[in-house]
Amino acid sequence: MKKDEVPQDRGFSDGVREISYAVDENGRYVLVQSRGWEPKTVANDQAWEVIEEDLREQIRLIRSGKRSPLAYHMTRHLMDIGLLSSYADLPRWRVRRHLKPKVFRRLSADLKARYAGIFGITVAQLHEVPETAEINPHE
Amino acid sequence: MNDSTAIEIPFHHRQSAHCETGVLSNLVSHHGLEISEAMVFGIGSGLFFGYFPFVRLNKLPLTAYRIATGGIMSRTTKRLGIRLEWQKFRSPDKAMAALDRMLEAGIPVGCRTGAYWLSYFPPRYRFHFNMHNLVAFGKNNGSYRISDPVFPDPVDCPAEDLAKARFAKGSMAPKGRMYHVARVPAPDQVDLARAVQKGIKEVCRSMLRVPGPFIGAKGIRYLAKKVENWPSKLGDRRAALHLGQIIRMQEEIGTGGGGFRFIYAAFLQEAAPILALPVLSEFSGRMTDIGDRWRDFAVIGSRICKGRASESESYSALADILRDCADREAVLFTDLEDAVR
């Protein structure tokens, strides 16, 4: 890649410019800042689309009474049962049970506070599930 | 903790492409041995290729363009006679207190962290990725001064976030790991040529002679075969997801472009006068051309992901590019190995 070919496309890093290695007019390697590169942005977009799809599905399941709100927050924070259980310091099977609305409703205040703490929200917010699955990563 | 005294160690932050190499280059330079990121990458034999369909990342197969995390640091420090002192912790409080003590003693500290909890990261970069490295070099008002090598300038990170990031959970959990430079040899005591030679030899070995189908030039060919079959085997949607993941591993994680091929080309160029082997400059040019081919792969791959590919831009066209990369890398590393023997 030549120095003047370092792409300055639409990026996804909030204006943080990253380093590309490129060759200058004398054939010497130099470090050049890049705003973004379309193919790279497309691939990152795709990853977030998958997360949003998953989140939409979780919201649907919660609304139809098949999952507890914990499923929303877990997915919103890109976690699966394994990862959430290691943050909560609980065995997987317990976290899996907490994804059931009935079990979640009877959850102790302590455990609810523990989950809320992981996600950096209040216990009241732990019960809230938004209407849309849109994640605005620029928020 | 007493936050009344602000600490800021004079630390020269240089932006880099990649976190592990950038941190080590900045830390070692701070201690008097001036060394570029590309040099660290090359001496540490960072360049790699591996396609591991049985290892899953975000439920998709893992493709690696560099050696396993920590490998570059351990090889580079060993080959240059640098000693890093590592610590890991069970308790976040102890880990943060230990960090503060080092800073109070005027020593910049490298930390292994997860990316997800680092609030200064652009949100769309915040995945559960536990192999990030950064340098803490000061503290003020409950916030740490951080030299994160992939950022243009030093940043501030609240103590809670840094503690969370240092104790991120999941695979490769950092467990509060931190390190500092305990010993750096004087610049005239370093046998740079020998270190460079060792670094090159090891990359040649891993690109040419690791048994099994997954690693090196063979690994690229293996991936080519898989890529060709994805649309029929997985369907369009899943195939596109598999493809997107490769592009991300190649471009997103601070590779300097082309899956670290350009950084390696920069290293070969810098290595030429050190080994008194002008031919390495020519190899550097060939490596650059190979990096450009990898970029072609990403361009066409992303068009397929977006459903905007032309007739000729197909999965088999991608497989052909991969085979071309594999052939060229196999020849280049064979020549390189001969040259440094």
Image (cartoon, rainbow, N blue to C red):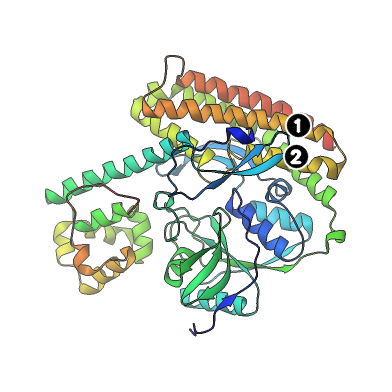
Using the image, determine if residue A125 lies above or below residue B143.
above
Using the image, determine if residue B141 lies above or below residue B63.
below
**Mark count:** 2
Q: Residue furthest top?
A: B311
Q: Nearer the viewer, residue B123 or B8?
A: B8
Residue type beneath disc 2? Leu
User: What residue do we see at 71% from left, 29% from top?
Assistant: B286
In the figure, is residue A54 to the left or right of B294? left
**Circles 2 and 1: CB distance less than 8 Å?**
yes
Residue B236 visible? The answer is yes
The secondary structure type at the circle numbered 1 is: helix
In the figure, is residue B232 to the left or right of B114? left
Q: Which mark is residue B283?
A: 1
Q: Which mark is residue B268?
A: 2
Residue B91 visible? The answer is no
Q: Residues within 10 Å of mark 2 (few under 14, many from 20)?
A: many
* Residue B201 image point, x, y percent: 77, 41
Q: Which mark is residue A121?
A: none
User: What residue do we see at 34% from left, 50% from top?
Assistant: A137
